[in-house]
Image (cartoon, rainbow, N blue to C red):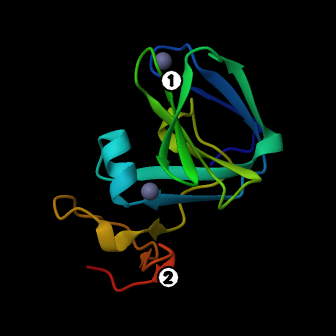
């Protein structure tokens, strides 16, 4: 965790660069199948921040948005393929950012696993964070 107020991040090739001003709103590991495919990873650690606290500093031409479901779109770098952002009409005031794209720690740590019903069987988690799932992705579920 960091006490800094501004956190920078970017894609693998460096074309897309951005900054986030604290405070962020939340941070969680998402195990849904869309995140898994989009990022090529067992799960994706996201944090949410108000759109007014997010600023794109580079890569306007490289940043492409893919509409993954009717209300949601995912932002990635068209040069290097890094998956970076998620935005949805479900949370119009917020942007979700992949924590792994940040240059360092932000102002909070992951606090839960969401959409845990969809988790892969080939990764064993060692933490004691709450597991959530169900239709909304955030209802309490039994660890397993
Ligand atoms: Zn890139
Ligand atoms: Zn997800």
Instruction: Determine whether the beta carbon of the residue marked 1 sits less than 8 angstroms from the nearest atom of ligand 1.
Output: yes
**Residue at figure coordinates x 41%, y 69% from the top left:** 115
Q: Which residue corresponds to mark 1?
A: 11
**SS assignment at label 2:** strand
Vertical placement of residue 134 versus 93, above or below: below
Question: Residue 110 placed where, x, y %?
Answer: 53, 59
Dot 2, crowdedness within 10 Å: few (<14), some or many (≥20)?
A: few
**In this rendering, would 143 be left or right of 115?**
left
**In this rendering, would 137 be left or right of 86?**
left
Q: Which of the two labelled residues, at mark 1 and mark 2, occupies the earlier sequence position?
A: 1
**In this rendering, would 40 be left or right of 49?**
left
How far is mark 1 from mark 2, CA to CA? 32 Å
Dot 1, crowdedness within 10 Å: few (<14), some or many (≥20)?
A: many
Q: Which residue corresponds to mark 2?
A: 139
Vertical placement of residue 141 versus 35, above or below: below
- Which image quarter holds the C terminus? bottom left
- The circle on residue 120 is none
Tag count: 2
Viewer-proximal residue among 141 and 51: 51
Question: Residue 27 placed where, x, y %?
Answer: 58, 57
């Amino acid at each position: 965790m960091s006490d800094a107020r501004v956190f920078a991040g970017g894609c693998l090739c460096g074309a897309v660069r951005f900054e986030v001003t604290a405070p962020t709103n939340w941070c969680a590991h998402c195990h849904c199948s869309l995140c898994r495919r989009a990022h090529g990873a067992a799960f994706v650690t996201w944090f949410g921040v108000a759109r007014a606290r997010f600023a794109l500093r580079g890569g306007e031409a490289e940043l492409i948005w893919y509409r993954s479901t009717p209300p949601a779109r995912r932002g990635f770098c068209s040069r290097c393929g890094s998956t970076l952002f998620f935005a949805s009409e479900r949370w119009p005031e917020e942007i979700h950012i992949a924590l792994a794209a940040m240059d360092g720690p932000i102002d909070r740590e992951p606090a839960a696993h969401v959409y845990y019903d969809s988790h892969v069987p080939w990764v064993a988690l060692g933490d004691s964070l709450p597991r959530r799932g169900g239709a909304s992705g955030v209802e309490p579920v039994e660890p397993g």
